[in-house]
Image (cartoon, grey):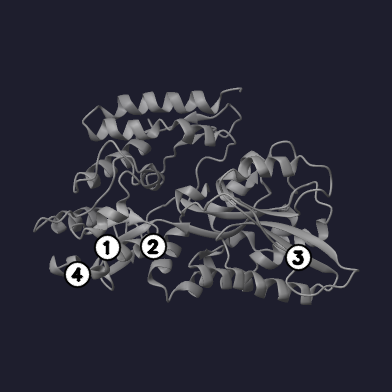
Amino acid sequence: MRRRSLLALAPLGLVGACGLVPHGSDRRTVTMWLMKDSASPAFLRRFTEAFEHEHSNLRLDIRIQQWTGIGQKVQAALDADSGQGPDVIEVGNTQVPQYVEGDRLLDLTLESALRWGRDDWLPGLAEPGQSLSHQYGIPWYAANRVVVYRKDLFARAGVKTPPRTRDEWLTVTERLNSGGNQGIYLAGQDWYTLAGFIWDEGGDLADDGGNGGGWRGTLDTPAALRGMDHYRRLHALGDGPARADEEHPPQAGVFAKGRVAQIVAVPGLARTVVQQNPDLEGKLGFFPVPGRTAAAPGAVFTGGSDLVVPNNTGEREGAVAVVAALTGAKWDTELARTMNYVPNKKKLAESVADEEGVAAMAAGAARGRATPSTPQWGAVEADNPIKPYMTKVLLGADPATEARRASKRITEILNRLD
Protein backbone atom coordinates (compact mmCIF):
# COMPACT_ATOMS: atom_id res chain seq x y z
CA MET A 1 0.00 0.00 0.00
CA ARG A 2 0.94 3.62 0.08
CA ARG A 3 1.83 3.89 3.77
CA ARG A 4 0.30 7.35 4.10
CA SER A 5 -3.07 5.66 3.77
CA LEU A 6 -2.81 3.84 7.10
CA LEU A 7 0.25 4.92 9.02
CA ALA A 8 1.88 8.28 9.71
CA LEU A 9 4.72 9.38 7.46
CA ALA A 10 8.11 10.00 9.03
CA PRO A 11 10.47 12.88 8.16
CA LEU A 12 12.74 12.43 5.15
CA GLY A 13 16.06 10.79 5.89
CA LEU A 14 18.11 7.61 5.68
CA VAL A 15 19.50 5.50 8.48
CA GLY A 16 21.97 2.70 7.83
CA ALA A 17 21.93 -0.32 10.13
CA CYS A 18 24.81 -2.47 8.98
CA GLY A 19 25.52 -5.94 10.35
CA LEU A 20 24.67 -6.22 14.00
CA VAL A 21 27.13 -8.96 15.00
CA PRO A 22 30.81 -9.52 14.12
CA HIS A 23 31.44 -11.20 10.76
CA GLY A 24 34.19 -13.18 9.14
CA SER A 25 35.76 -11.87 5.97
CA ASP A 26 34.38 -14.79 3.95
CA ARG A 27 30.73 -13.83 4.46
CA ARG A 28 28.69 -12.51 1.53
CA THR A 29 26.51 -9.46 2.19
CA VAL A 30 22.75 -9.29 1.61
CA THR A 31 21.58 -5.67 1.56
CA MET A 32 17.98 -5.01 2.60
CA TRP A 33 15.90 -1.88 2.32
CA LEU A 34 13.21 -1.81 4.99
CA MET A 35 10.86 1.07 5.69
CA LYS A 36 10.96 3.23 8.79
CA ASP A 37 8.82 1.92 11.64
CA SER A 38 7.91 -1.31 9.86
CA ALA A 39 9.94 -3.26 12.41
CA SER A 40 11.43 -2.20 15.72
CA PRO A 41 15.22 -2.03 16.15
CA ALA A 42 14.98 -4.81 18.75
CA PHE A 43 13.14 -7.08 16.33
CA LEU A 44 15.70 -6.43 13.59
CA ARG A 45 18.53 -7.16 15.99
CA ARG A 46 16.98 -10.48 17.03
CA PHE A 47 16.30 -11.47 13.44
CA THR A 48 19.78 -10.53 12.25
CA GLU A 49 21.53 -12.45 14.97
CA ALA A 50 19.41 -15.56 14.38
CA PHE A 51 19.67 -15.39 10.59
CA GLU A 52 23.44 -14.93 10.57
CA HIS A 53 23.83 -17.76 13.06
CA GLU A 54 21.87 -20.08 10.77
CA HIS A 55 23.57 -18.81 7.59
CA SER A 56 27.24 -18.63 8.46
CA ASN A 57 28.16 -17.58 4.92
CA LEU A 58 25.90 -14.49 4.92
CA ARG A 59 25.76 -11.14 6.68
CA LEU A 60 22.87 -8.67 6.65
CA ASP A 61 23.14 -4.97 5.86
CA ILE A 62 19.76 -3.46 6.80
CA ARG A 63 19.17 0.09 5.57
CA ILE A 64 16.12 1.95 6.81
CA GLN A 65 14.24 4.06 4.27
CA GLN A 66 11.58 6.75 4.49
CA TRP A 67 8.25 6.42 2.67
CA THR A 68 8.50 9.94 1.30
CA GLY A 69 10.10 9.70 -2.14
CA ILE A 70 10.65 5.96 -1.93
CA GLY A 71 9.10 5.25 -5.33
CA GLN A 72 11.80 7.07 -7.28
CA LYS A 73 14.50 5.51 -5.09
CA VAL A 74 13.24 2.00 -5.75
CA GLN A 75 12.88 2.65 -9.48
CA ALA A 76 16.49 3.83 -9.62
CA ALA A 77 17.67 0.80 -7.64
CA LEU A 78 15.87 -1.59 -9.98
CA ASP A 79 17.55 0.06 -12.97
CA ALA A 80 21.06 0.05 -11.45
CA ASP A 81 23.90 -2.11 -12.72
CA SER A 82 23.92 -5.67 -11.45
CA GLY A 83 25.02 -5.95 -7.85
CA GLN A 84 24.93 -2.20 -7.22
CA GLY A 85 21.58 -1.97 -5.46
CA PRO A 86 19.73 -3.67 -2.61
CA ASP A 87 19.06 -7.40 -2.71
CA VAL A 88 15.72 -7.32 -0.86
CA ILE A 89 13.28 -4.39 -0.77
CA GLU A 90 10.17 -3.83 1.32
CA VAL A 91 7.48 -2.20 -0.82
CA GLY A 92 3.86 -1.27 -0.22
CA ASN A 93 1.63 -4.09 -1.43
CA THR A 94 -0.20 -1.91 -3.98
CA GLN A 95 3.10 -0.58 -5.32
CA VAL A 96 4.34 -3.95 -6.60
CA PRO A 97 2.66 -3.68 -10.05
CA GLN A 98 4.62 -0.55 -10.97
CA TYR A 99 7.91 -2.30 -10.19
CA VAL A 100 7.10 -5.51 -12.09
CA GLU A 101 7.17 -3.72 -15.43
CA GLY A 102 10.30 -4.24 -17.50
CA ASP A 103 11.17 -7.63 -15.98
CA ARG A 104 12.93 -5.94 -13.06
CA LEU A 105 11.81 -8.22 -10.21
CA LEU A 106 12.78 -11.82 -9.56
CA ASP A 107 9.98 -14.30 -10.27
CA LEU A 108 9.44 -16.15 -6.99
CA THR A 109 6.48 -18.26 -8.12
CA LEU A 110 8.20 -21.62 -7.73
CA GLU A 111 9.60 -20.83 -4.29
CA SER A 112 6.27 -19.50 -3.05
CA ALA A 113 4.35 -22.51 -4.34
CA LEU A 114 6.69 -25.20 -3.04
CA ARG A 115 8.02 -23.74 0.21
CA TRP A 116 6.17 -20.68 1.39
CA GLY A 117 2.52 -21.72 1.70
CA ARG A 118 1.12 -19.25 -0.78
CA ASP A 119 -2.37 -20.80 -0.70
CA ASP A 120 -2.89 -19.40 2.81
CA TRP A 121 -1.59 -15.88 2.19
CA LEU A 122 -3.87 -12.92 2.81
CA PRO A 123 -5.37 -12.09 -0.59
CA GLY A 124 -4.93 -8.34 -0.11
CA LEU A 125 -1.17 -8.86 0.12
CA ALA A 126 -0.74 -11.72 -2.34
CA GLU A 127 -2.83 -10.50 -5.27
CA PRO A 128 -1.03 -7.17 -5.85
CA GLY A 129 2.25 -9.11 -5.85
CA GLN A 130 1.16 -11.18 -8.84
CA SER A 131 1.35 -10.52 -12.54
CA LEU A 132 -0.02 -13.01 -15.07
CA SER A 133 -0.11 -15.69 -12.34
CA HIS A 134 3.56 -15.13 -11.48
CA GLN A 135 4.44 -14.11 -7.90
CA TYR A 136 6.91 -11.24 -7.50
CA GLY A 137 5.86 -9.71 -4.17
CA ILE A 138 5.93 -11.97 -1.11
CA PRO A 139 3.43 -10.95 1.63
CA TRP A 140 5.05 -9.75 4.85
CA TYR A 141 2.47 -8.03 7.10
CA ALA A 142 -0.90 -6.31 6.86
CA ALA A 143 -3.06 -3.65 8.47
CA ASN A 144 -6.66 -2.73 7.72
CA ARG A 145 -9.63 -0.81 9.02
CA VAL A 146 -11.98 -1.98 11.75
CA VAL A 147 -14.78 -0.28 13.66
CA VAL A 148 -13.45 1.53 16.74
CA TYR A 149 -16.32 2.06 19.15
CA ARG A 150 -17.26 3.45 22.56
CA LYS A 151 -18.10 0.50 24.83
CA ASP A 152 -19.81 2.77 27.32
CA LEU A 153 -22.09 4.36 24.72
CA PHE A 154 -23.00 0.94 23.32
CA ALA A 155 -23.91 -0.26 26.83
CA ARG A 156 -25.91 2.89 27.52
CA ALA A 157 -27.90 2.25 24.33
CA GLY A 158 -28.55 -1.36 25.37
CA VAL A 159 -26.27 -2.85 22.70
CA LYS A 160 -24.68 -5.87 24.36
CA THR A 161 -22.64 -7.23 21.44
CA PRO A 162 -21.21 -5.56 18.34
CA PRO A 163 -23.22 -6.01 15.14
CA ARG A 164 -22.19 -8.78 12.74
CA THR A 165 -24.22 -7.86 9.67
CA ARG A 166 -24.55 -4.61 7.77
CA ASP A 167 -28.28 -4.41 8.49
CA GLU A 168 -27.62 -4.87 12.23
CA TRP A 169 -24.93 -2.21 11.99
CA LEU A 170 -27.38 0.31 10.56
CA THR A 171 -29.96 -0.51 13.25
CA VAL A 172 -27.43 -0.24 16.08
CA THR A 173 -25.96 2.97 14.72
CA GLU A 174 -29.39 4.60 14.52
CA ARG A 175 -30.02 3.57 18.14
CA LEU A 176 -26.75 5.20 19.17
CA ASN A 177 -27.97 8.54 17.82
CA SER A 178 -29.29 9.77 21.15
CA GLY A 179 -28.45 12.22 23.88
CA GLY A 180 -26.61 14.50 21.47
CA ASN A 181 -24.25 11.74 20.31
CA GLN A 182 -23.46 10.74 16.74
CA GLY A 183 -24.04 7.07 16.05
CA ILE A 184 -21.04 7.14 13.71
CA TYR A 185 -18.62 9.67 12.29
CA LEU A 186 -18.02 8.78 8.64
CA ALA A 187 -16.47 11.36 6.34
CA GLY A 188 -18.07 11.69 2.94
CA GLN A 189 -14.95 10.87 0.93
CA ASP A 190 -13.59 7.85 2.82
CA TRP A 191 -13.22 5.90 -0.39
CA TYR A 192 -11.23 3.03 1.11
CA THR A 193 -14.22 2.20 3.30
CA LEU A 194 -16.52 2.53 0.28
CA ALA A 195 -14.29 0.09 -1.63
CA GLY A 196 -14.96 -2.56 1.01
CA PHE A 197 -18.73 -2.18 0.61
CA ILE A 198 -18.37 -2.43 -3.17
CA TRP A 199 -16.25 -5.59 -2.91
CA ASP A 200 -18.79 -7.05 -0.49
CA GLU A 201 -21.42 -6.68 -3.19
CA GLY A 202 -19.25 -8.43 -5.78
CA GLY A 203 -18.18 -5.24 -7.54
CA ASP A 204 -14.86 -3.43 -7.97
CA LEU A 205 -13.42 0.02 -8.55
CA ALA A 206 -12.05 -1.00 -11.95
CA ASP A 207 -11.29 -4.15 -13.91
CA ASP A 208 -9.52 -5.30 -17.06
CA GLY A 209 -12.29 -7.58 -18.23
CA GLY A 210 -9.97 -10.57 -18.03
CA ASN A 211 -9.47 -10.50 -21.78
CA GLY A 212 -6.74 -7.92 -22.27
CA GLY A 213 -9.21 -5.35 -23.52
CA GLY A 214 -7.89 -2.63 -21.28
CA TRP A 215 -8.81 -1.33 -17.86
CA ARG A 216 -12.09 0.47 -17.21
CA GLY A 217 -13.76 2.09 -14.24
CA THR A 218 -16.65 0.08 -12.81
CA LEU A 219 -18.32 2.31 -10.23
CA ASP A 220 -21.42 2.26 -12.43
CA THR A 221 -22.07 -1.48 -12.16
CA PRO A 222 -25.12 -2.60 -10.16
CA ALA A 223 -22.87 -4.16 -7.50
CA ALA A 224 -20.80 -1.00 -7.05
CA LEU A 225 -23.95 1.12 -6.86
CA ARG A 226 -25.29 -1.13 -4.09
CA GLY A 227 -22.04 -0.58 -2.18
CA MET A 228 -22.40 3.19 -2.56
CA ASP A 229 -26.00 3.01 -1.36
CA HIS A 230 -24.92 1.27 1.84
CA TYR A 231 -22.27 3.94 2.35
CA ARG A 232 -24.91 6.65 1.87
CA ARG A 233 -27.23 5.07 4.43
CA LEU A 234 -24.45 4.69 7.01
CA HIS A 235 -23.12 8.21 6.43
CA ALA A 236 -26.61 9.62 7.02
CA LEU A 237 -26.54 8.33 10.60
CA GLY A 238 -23.82 10.79 11.60
CA ASP A 239 -22.63 14.31 10.88
CA GLY A 240 -19.54 13.50 8.83
CA PRO A 241 -18.76 16.18 6.21
CA ALA A 242 -19.88 15.21 2.71
CA ARG A 243 -17.13 17.24 1.03
CA ALA A 244 -14.08 15.94 2.94
CA ASP A 245 -12.18 12.75 3.72
CA GLU A 246 -11.31 11.26 7.10
CA GLU A 247 -8.22 13.47 7.47
CA HIS A 248 -10.06 16.80 7.05
CA PRO A 249 -10.54 17.20 9.92
CA PRO A 250 -8.63 14.23 11.38
CA GLN A 251 -11.30 11.85 12.62
CA ALA A 252 -9.26 10.95 15.71
CA GLY A 253 -9.77 14.50 16.95
CA VAL A 254 -13.50 14.38 16.25
CA PHE A 255 -13.81 11.06 18.08
CA ALA A 256 -11.79 12.37 21.03
CA LYS A 257 -14.36 15.08 21.71
CA GLY A 258 -16.53 12.36 23.25
CA ARG A 259 -19.75 12.69 21.29
CA VAL A 260 -19.17 9.98 18.66
CA ALA A 261 -19.98 6.30 19.15
CA GLN A 262 -18.01 4.79 16.22
CA ILE A 263 -15.44 5.46 13.54
CA VAL A 264 -13.93 3.24 10.84
CA ALA A 265 -10.15 3.28 11.24
CA VAL A 266 -7.05 1.22 11.93
CA PRO A 267 -6.90 0.17 15.60
CA GLY A 268 -3.73 2.18 16.21
CA LEU A 269 -5.77 5.37 15.88
CA ALA A 270 -7.28 4.59 19.28
CA ARG A 271 -3.97 5.55 20.90
CA THR A 272 -4.20 8.99 19.35
CA VAL A 273 -7.78 9.34 20.56
CA VAL A 274 -6.85 8.49 24.15
CA GLN A 275 -3.86 10.82 24.05
CA GLN A 276 -6.21 13.65 23.13
CA ASN A 277 -8.88 12.59 25.65
CA PRO A 278 -7.49 10.49 28.55
CA ASP A 279 -11.03 10.09 29.90
CA LEU A 280 -11.60 7.54 27.11
CA GLU A 281 -8.91 5.19 28.45
CA GLY A 282 -10.43 1.69 28.71
CA LYS A 283 -13.67 2.73 26.99
CA LEU A 284 -12.71 1.92 23.39
CA GLY A 285 -13.33 -1.41 21.70
CA PHE A 286 -12.92 -2.89 18.23
CA PHE A 287 -14.91 -5.14 15.92
CA PRO A 288 -14.53 -6.12 12.25
CA VAL A 289 -16.47 -4.15 9.67
CA PRO A 290 -19.73 -6.16 9.45
CA GLY A 291 -20.47 -8.19 6.34
CA ARG A 292 -23.64 -8.76 4.37
CA THR A 293 -24.35 -11.83 6.52
CA ALA A 294 -23.07 -13.02 9.89
CA ALA A 295 -21.09 -15.79 8.16
CA ALA A 296 -18.10 -13.55 7.51
CA PRO A 297 -16.89 -9.99 8.19
CA GLY A 298 -17.10 -7.39 5.49
CA ALA A 299 -14.42 -6.95 2.86
CA VAL A 300 -11.81 -4.30 3.68
CA PHE A 301 -8.93 -2.62 1.95
CA THR A 302 -5.75 -4.38 3.07
CA GLY A 303 -2.65 -2.29 3.35
CA GLY A 304 0.75 -3.56 4.28
CA SER A 305 4.03 -4.61 2.75
CA ASP A 306 5.48 -7.22 0.43
CA LEU A 307 9.13 -8.16 0.02
CA VAL A 308 10.62 -8.19 -3.48
CA VAL A 309 13.97 -9.24 -4.91
CA PRO A 310 15.38 -7.12 -7.76
CA ASN A 311 16.47 -9.06 -10.84
CA ASN A 312 19.76 -7.16 -10.74
CA THR A 313 20.70 -8.51 -7.32
CA GLY A 314 24.24 -9.76 -6.97
CA GLU A 315 23.20 -12.13 -4.17
CA ARG A 316 20.16 -14.01 -5.42
CA GLU A 317 20.51 -17.09 -3.19
CA GLY A 318 21.03 -15.01 -0.07
CA ALA A 319 18.13 -12.69 -0.93
CA VAL A 320 15.74 -15.59 -1.31
CA ALA A 321 16.93 -17.00 2.03
CA VAL A 322 16.20 -13.69 3.76
CA VAL A 323 12.71 -13.45 2.25
CA ALA A 324 11.97 -17.04 3.25
CA ALA A 325 13.03 -16.39 6.84
CA LEU A 326 11.29 -13.02 7.33
CA THR A 327 7.98 -14.18 5.84
CA GLY A 328 8.05 -17.61 7.46
CA ALA A 329 5.73 -18.43 10.36
CA LYS A 330 8.27 -17.88 13.17
CA TRP A 331 9.47 -14.40 12.30
CA ASP A 332 6.26 -13.20 10.69
CA THR A 333 4.35 -14.09 13.84
CA GLU A 334 6.92 -12.39 16.04
CA LEU A 335 6.78 -9.24 13.91
CA ALA A 336 2.98 -9.19 14.08
CA ARG A 337 2.99 -9.50 17.86
CA THR A 338 5.77 -6.93 18.25
CA MET A 339 4.25 -4.30 15.97
CA ASN A 340 0.50 -5.10 16.25
CA TYR A 341 0.23 -6.17 12.62
CA VAL A 342 -1.77 -8.91 10.96
CA PRO A 343 0.46 -11.87 9.97
CA ASN A 344 0.73 -12.75 6.29
CA LYS A 345 -1.17 -16.05 6.54
CA LYS A 346 -4.77 -16.59 7.61
CA LYS A 347 -3.84 -19.56 9.81
CA LEU A 348 -1.52 -17.33 11.84
CA ALA A 349 -4.38 -15.07 12.98
CA GLU A 350 -4.61 -16.96 16.27
CA SER A 351 -1.16 -15.64 17.19
CA VAL A 352 -2.65 -12.14 17.67
CA ALA A 353 -6.00 -13.24 19.14
CA ASP A 354 -5.17 -11.78 22.56
CA GLU A 355 -5.01 -8.22 21.16
CA GLU A 356 -8.59 -7.05 20.59
CA GLY A 357 -7.81 -4.49 17.90
CA VAL A 358 -5.39 -6.72 15.99
CA ALA A 359 -7.75 -9.69 16.23
CA ALA A 360 -10.49 -7.56 14.67
CA MET A 361 -8.08 -6.58 11.90
CA ALA A 362 -7.10 -10.20 11.29
CA ALA A 363 -10.74 -11.26 10.96
CA GLY A 364 -11.30 -8.61 8.30
CA ALA A 365 -7.97 -9.22 6.56
CA ALA A 366 -9.00 -12.78 5.74
CA ARG A 367 -11.45 -11.20 3.29
CA GLY A 368 -9.30 -8.20 2.47
CA ARG A 369 -8.61 -6.83 -0.97
CA ALA A 370 -6.26 -4.33 -2.57
CA THR A 371 -6.77 -1.65 -5.18
CA PRO A 372 -6.78 -2.74 -8.85
CA SER A 373 -3.48 -4.36 -9.77
CA THR A 374 -2.27 -2.02 -12.48
CA PRO A 375 0.74 0.33 -12.51
CA GLN A 376 -1.60 3.17 -13.48
CA TRP A 377 -3.68 2.98 -10.30
CA GLY A 378 -1.40 5.49 -8.59
CA ALA A 379 -2.45 8.06 -11.20
CA VAL A 380 -6.10 7.34 -10.39
CA GLU A 381 -5.47 8.04 -6.71
CA ALA A 382 -3.63 11.26 -7.57
CA ASP A 383 -6.63 12.55 -9.56
CA ASN A 384 -9.17 10.55 -7.53
CA PRO A 385 -12.55 10.95 -9.23
CA ILE A 386 -14.02 8.62 -6.58
CA LYS A 387 -14.06 11.34 -3.93
CA PRO A 388 -16.17 13.94 -5.79
CA TYR A 389 -18.46 11.13 -6.96
CA MET A 390 -19.15 10.20 -3.34
CA THR A 391 -19.77 13.81 -2.37
CA LYS A 392 -22.25 14.37 -5.17
CA VAL A 393 -24.23 11.27 -4.28
CA LEU A 394 -24.30 12.17 -0.57
CA LEU A 395 -25.59 15.64 -1.49
CA GLY A 396 -28.47 14.16 -3.47
CA ALA A 397 -27.25 13.73 -7.06
CA ASP A 398 -28.36 10.70 -9.07
CA PRO A 399 -25.95 7.85 -8.19
CA ALA A 400 -26.07 6.12 -11.58
CA THR A 401 -25.33 9.32 -13.50
CA GLU A 402 -22.43 10.32 -11.25
CA ALA A 403 -21.06 6.78 -11.22
CA ARG A 404 -20.92 6.75 -15.02
CA ARG A 405 -19.03 10.03 -15.03
CA ALA A 406 -16.55 8.84 -12.41
CA SER A 407 -16.08 5.50 -14.16
CA LYS A 408 -15.38 7.25 -17.44
CA ARG A 409 -12.71 9.39 -15.78
CA ILE A 410 -11.10 6.32 -14.17
CA THR A 411 -11.06 4.59 -17.56
CA GLU A 412 -9.38 7.58 -19.18
CA ILE A 413 -6.65 7.70 -16.53
CA LEU A 414 -5.99 3.94 -16.60
CA ASN A 415 -5.55 3.97 -20.35
CA ARG A 416 -3.39 7.07 -20.70
CA LEU A 417 -0.21 6.43 -22.67
CA ASP A 418 1.98 8.99 -20.87
Q: Calculate the distance from the C-alpha at mark 4 to the C-alpha at mark 3.
A: 49 Å
Q: Position of residue 69 (x, y in %)?
A: 59, 43
For label 3, the residue is: 60
Task: Rate crowding at label 1 as few (under 14), some (14 to 19) or many (20 or more) other CA atoms within 10 Å.
Answer: many
**CB under 8 Å between discs 4 and 3:** no
Q: Circle 2 — which element? A: loop
- Marks 1/2: CA–CA distance: 10 Å
Task: In the rendered structure, find residue 326 and report the number of the disc placed on it.
Answer: none
Residue at image coords 31%, 28%: 400
The front one of 79 and 67 is 67
* Callout 3 touching callout 1 (CB < 8 Å): no
The amino acid at mark 4 is Asp
Q: Earlier in the sequence, mark 4 or mark 3?
A: 3
Q: Label 4 belongs to which residue?
A: 152
Residue 374 x/y as whole percent: 58, 37
- Residue at left 51%, top 26%? 413
Q: Mark 3 belongs to which amino acid?
A: Leu
Q: Is residue 357 above or below residue 387?
A: below
Nearest the eye: 152 or 8: 8
Residue 258 picture location, percent across and down: 20, 60
Q: Which residue is mark 2?
A: 267
Callout 1 amino acid: Tyr
Q: Secondary structure at mark 1?
A: strand
Q: Earlier in the sequence, mark 2 or mark 3?
A: 3
